[in-house]
Image: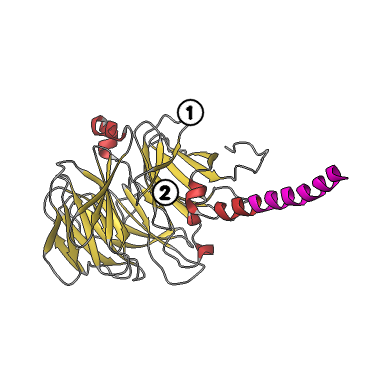
């Protein structure tokens, strides 16, 4: 009898413990960092231009998550838009545009493409792109056509930073050493900043009319709408080109240098905070192609993680606050240099583009979930 009583007492406790463990795992699975540690390659797309995918972006400017599902890429003279949500969990081509020369436009290759912040209109999204032809094209996704051409820059467009709060407004950076502020409904720039030599990249403030600029000598400058003066936030301490700059939040910015270092900087004082070294990230410093199209990192919605690639095809995910590595995304068949890596909404996937015209998507899968699905190409 004692043996039987013991088994009756233990079994319910074991079942309860097992159920509690399952609930704990499910709760833990809801955190972005847990998802980041459990990503698996699920989708590969080869774009037919067979050139470097030089820029990519997600439609992340809508507050409504259901509208934040589009991905845009540019390579050669193509603009490709993908649906990342409504096609059976796949990423599938939804819109294809070739930037041909017309009587109004020079056409040709683009070097930067970005989604603009739009009003809550479910049937429309706007894209801004530009390149060596000096003009900026505003494209309607709903109609798959150019709706406005913005001219004023005197050299190649190198970066675009959408205003996070004003619909259709954005900053643009050019090799003519200027930063311009535009409204997509107006042919003329609303303000022109003299940015000085060595301008490489820009990022707009989450709420205010402020733009940060990264430079070839490693310095960071701040420009404010309504003021024509630049404020040097961060001096050329590293003497290394800044390839990418983004706001983490209103108080901090993150920059990535050509030597493979992610540096957190106080956006008010310019104080250097924690630093993250990307393994083999400095290889791109000796790679001519990566000098022309350097790696761009991505920050998660929770603003606590960054994903950043290198010229050997690897992508690393780090905790921004602790500088600890959360995951490494790689596989032998990835041989191209990473040009862009970015989180999807809720950090459920990481999308990576490489210089051999390939898009890679890594999806979250719970470690207890045994799936029979195979890699989709």
Give 183 or 35, whichever is nearer the viewer: 35
Give 194 or 334, whichever is nearer the viewer: 334
The scheme the figure's colours follow is secondary structure
- Residue drawn at the location 28% of the way across and 31% of the way down: 283
> How busy is the neighbourhood of tag 1: few (under 14 within 10 Å), some, or many (20 plus)?
few
Q: Secondary structure at mark 1?
A: loop
The image quarter containing residue 290 is top left
- Could you tell me residue 334's position as x and y percent? 45, 31
Give 283 or 293, whichever is nearer the viewer: 283
Residue that label 1 marks: 333
Magenta residues (range):
1-21
Q: Secondary structure at mark 2?
A: strand
Give 322 or 71, whichever is nearer the viewer: 322
- Could you tell me residue 185's position as x and y percent? 32, 70
Residue that label 2 marks: 342
Mark 1 or mark 2, which is nearer the start of the sequence?
Answer: 1
Residue 95 visible, this orientation? no
**Quarter of the image containing the C terminus?**
top right
Question: Seen in the image, is 108 located left or right of residue 195?
Answer: right
Residue 107 visible, this orientation? yes
- Residue drawn at the location 38% of the way across and 66% of the way down: 117
Marks 2 and 1 in Cβ contact (< 8 Å): no
- Residue drawn at the location 41% of the way across and 68% of the way down: 118
Q: Is residue 117 above or below residue 259?
A: below
- Residue drawn at the location 17% of the way across and 72% of the way down: 226
Q: Is residue 121 above or below residue 140?
A: below
Q: Does the magenta stretch mainly form a helix, a strand or a loop? A: helix
**Quarter of the image containing the N terminus?**
top right
Q: Is residue 13 magenta?
A: yes
């Amino acid at each position: 009898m004692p043996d039987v009583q013991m088994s009756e007492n233990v079994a319910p406790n074991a079942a309860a413990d097992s159920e509690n463990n399952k609930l704990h795992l499910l709760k833990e699975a809801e955190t972005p960092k847990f998802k980041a540690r459990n990503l698996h390659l699920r989708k590969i797309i080869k774009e037919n231009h067979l050139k470097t995918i030089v820029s990519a972006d997600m439609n992340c400017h809508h507050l409504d998550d259901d509208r934040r599902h589009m991905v845009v890429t540019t390579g050669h003279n193509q603009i490709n838009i993908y649906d990342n949500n409504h096609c059976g969990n796949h990423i599938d081509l939804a819109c294809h545009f070739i930037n041909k020369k017309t009587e109004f436009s020079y056409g040709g290759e683009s070097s930067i493409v970005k989604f603009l912040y739009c009003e809550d209109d479910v049937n429309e999204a706007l894209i801004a792109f530009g390149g060596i032809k000096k003009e900026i094209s505003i494209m309607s996704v709903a109609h798959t056509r150019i709706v406005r051409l913005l001219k004023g820059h005197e050299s190649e467009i190198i970066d675009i930073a959408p205003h996070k709060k004003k619909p259709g407004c954005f900053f643009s950076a050019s090799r003519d050493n200027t930063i311009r502020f535009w409204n997509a409904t107006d042919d003329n720039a609303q303000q022109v900043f003299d940015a000085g030599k060595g301008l490489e990249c820009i990022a707009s403030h989450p709420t205010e009319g402020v733009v940060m600029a990264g430079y070839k000598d490693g310095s960071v400058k701040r420009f404010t709408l309504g003021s024509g003066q630049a404020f040097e936030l961060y001096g050329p301490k590293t003497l290394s080109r800044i390839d990418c700059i983004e706001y983490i939040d209103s108080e901090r910015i993150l920059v990535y240098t050509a030597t493979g270092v992610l540096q957190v900087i106080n956006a008010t004082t310019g104080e250097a905070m924690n630093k993250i070294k990307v393994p083999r990230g400095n290889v791109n410093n000796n790679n001519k192609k990566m000098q022309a199209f350097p790696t761009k990192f991505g920050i998660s919605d929770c603003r606590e993680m960054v994903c950043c690639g290198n010229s050997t095809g690897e992508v690393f995910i780090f905790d921004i606050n602790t500088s600890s590595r959360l995951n490494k995304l790689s596989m032998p068949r990835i041989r191209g240099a990473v040009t862009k890596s970015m989180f999807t909404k809720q950090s459920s996937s990481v999308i990576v583009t490489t210089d051999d015209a390939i898009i890679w998507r890594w999806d979250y899968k719970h470690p207890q979930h045994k799936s029979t699905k195979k890699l989709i190409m």
